[in-house]
Amino acid sequence: MSDDKTQSNPFAENEEIKEEEIKEEIKEEEIESKEEELKKELEDINNKYIRLAADFDNYRKRQMQERESLLKYGAEDTLKKIIPVLDTLERAKNSIEKTEDIKTVKESYEICTKQFIEILEKIGLKKIEAKDKPFDPNIMEAVMQTKTNDVEPHTVIAELQAGYQLHDRVLRPTMVNVAVEDDEENKE
């Protein structure tokens, strides 16, 4: 019996070798199959990337064209609203040339001014009201200070130049004269 154990079965070894070869072939086929799948997946991802890059480039070009158009024609809507004021000014000019009546000139001026202010307000421009209000450095610029005890300190007592806002953005601050406390008057 000991001879049986020491002797090896040549067929068993052959079968083991064949089994190993079959396993290796199956593994190689699986690897090749996986490689093909990965190559296809990589190709799909690469195609998607190329399409995405092209789409982004087109988007960037469209945005640049829109920006240029906005800069070039951005005032178009505003100017269309102002054109009627030009028409009114032209009519007022023609009517003034034929009259000597100062009342007619004044009325023409007031009509033009009113129409122009209404259009600017529709666009979003509004005058910053400052007189008799507390000084606000966000929308006002103090260019003068007057000592007085007639009003509260830091109150605007005069508007020297009108200020304007477009919606919530200050285009030009109102130049104002601000009251400051008069210490000499308090001493007496």
Image (cartoon, rainbow, N blue to C red):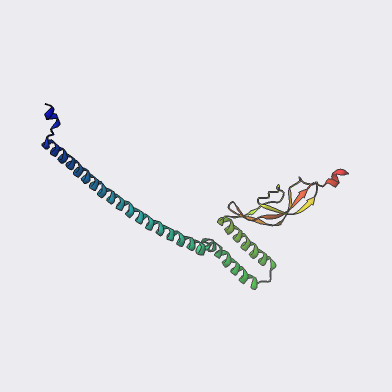
Q: Quadrant of residue 163?
A: bottom right
Please say if 11 is above or below 56.
above
Q: Residue furthest right?
A: 188
Q: Position of residue 166 (x, y in %)?
A: 59, 55
Q: Position of residue 184 (x, y in %)?
A: 85, 47
Please say if 181 is above or below 94.
above
Number of residue marks = 0
Q: Residue at image x 59%, y 69%?
A: 90
Q: Residue furthest front?
A: 3
**83 displayed left or right of 13:** right
Between 130 and 9, the one lying in front of the other is: 9
Q: Residue at image x 49%, y 61%?
A: 70
Q: Residue at image x 24%, y 46%?
A: 31
Q: Residue at image x 40%, y 56%?
A: 56
Q: Position of residue 5 (x, y in %)?
A: 14, 29
**50 displayed left or right of 143:** left
**159 displayed left or right of 56:** right
Between 63 and 183, the one lying in front of the other is: 63
Between 62 and 111, the one lying in front of the other is: 62
Q: Quadrant of residue 50?
A: bottom left
Quadrant containing the N terminus is: top left
**141 displayed left or right of 30:** right
Between 70 and 103, the one lying in front of the other is: 70
Q: Residue furthest top?
A: 1
Quadrant containing the C terminus is: top right
Please say if 163 is above or below 95.
above
Q: Quadrant of residue 162?
A: bottom right
Q: Position of residue 65 (x, y in %)?
A: 45, 62
